[in-house]
Image: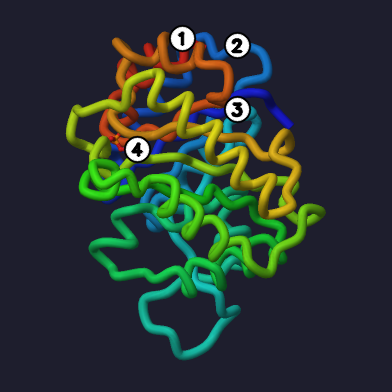
Amino acid sequence: MKNKYLIANWKMNKTLDENRDFFKIFLKKALTIPKTQIIFCPPFVGLFDVSNTLSGTGIEVGAQNVYFEESGAFTGETSTTMLKNCGCVWVILGHSERRSIFLEEEKLIRRKLENVLSSGLSPILCIGESLDERKNNDTSNVLYSQLSSALKNISNNSVENLIIAYEPVWAIGTGMVATASMIQETHNNIKQILTKLNFDNSKIPLIYGGSVKPNNAKELINIDNVDGFLVGGASLDPHVFYDIYNKF
Ligand code: PGA
């Protein structure tokens, strides 16, 4: 396992040509920071091409979603086998945009997580509270409920490659970033919740996401319980994303 993770969530951005243009620039840069795993999560249609481009670089590829069934009449869906066949190693699950826009519920996220773990792919499970929930002092309860539900049928032995991404919903794409003390406190809280749920929290990397930019990355990566970032907007430009990498 690497110690730090820098994950690009491209969301619904970039065509194949734009992906290639990105890597023409990005792969010329010095990517030599030790024990730091870079992962790119392009849209589904770009996965195969991006995997080929990144083959042999040590950079890994992830999908932004997956379905829990293996094959069949599930129009518009994609299975873990298809993702692996495209060179994917990781899958983002439970992103707040999937929860709020596509109405993904806890039970669906749980089934996806179980399926991803048994497929051999590695999940990046996103959790986080809304602004109202934070204002109402409900953050802890929300995180507990998201984690206990997603991990309900999963044992400590099977989460070897799980990453948890704490992404306060109010900080995603808004430019509003959580303060260092807020992140530190919330990550501690998540670790306590994991212990309560019988997981060895030292084995589960905990990364932060929500308006990470070159100008706040240094401060945030130096928080002792932050193991990396999930980056949306600032991962779309190779120079900006590289600036974040350089803060590790
Ligand atoms: P952002 O997105 O960096 O644009 O806030 C983060 C995410 O949604 O993963």
* Pair 1/4: label in front: 1
Q: Report, in whole angstroms, how far the alpha carbon at label 2 lies from the one at label 4.
A: 23 Å
Residue depicted at x 58% and y 31%:
59
Please name whichever residue, 193 or 99, is drawn nearer the observer in this view of the structure: 193
CB under 8 Å between callouts 3 and 2? Answer: no
Q: Report, in whole angstroms, how far the alpha carbon at label 1 lies from the one at label 4.
A: 21 Å
Q: Which residue is mark 3?
A: 37
User: Mark 2 is on which residue type?
Assistant: Ile
Q: Secondary structure at mark 3?
A: strand
First in sequence, mark 1 or 3: give its number: 3
Residue depicted at x 68% and y 60%:
117
Q: Report, in whole angstroms, how far the alpha carbon at label 4 lies from the one at label 3.
A: 19 Å
Q: Secondary structure at mark 4?
A: helix
User: Mark 1 is on which residue type?
Assistant: Asn
CB under 8 Å between callouts 1 and 2? Answer: yes
User: Mark 4 is on which residue type?
Assistant: Asn
- Graded by Cα atoms within 10 Å as few (under 14), some (14 to 19) or many (20 or more), the crowding at tag 3 reads some
* Pair 4/3: label in front: 3
Residue depicted at x 40% and y 19%:
181
Quadrant in the picture for the N terminus:
top right
Q: Which residue is mark 4?
A: 19
Q: Which residue is mark 2?
A: 33
User: Mark 3 is on which residue type?
Assistant: Gln
Please name whichever residue, 19 or 204, is drawn nearer the observer in this view of the structure: 204
> Residue 207: x percent and y percent?
51, 33
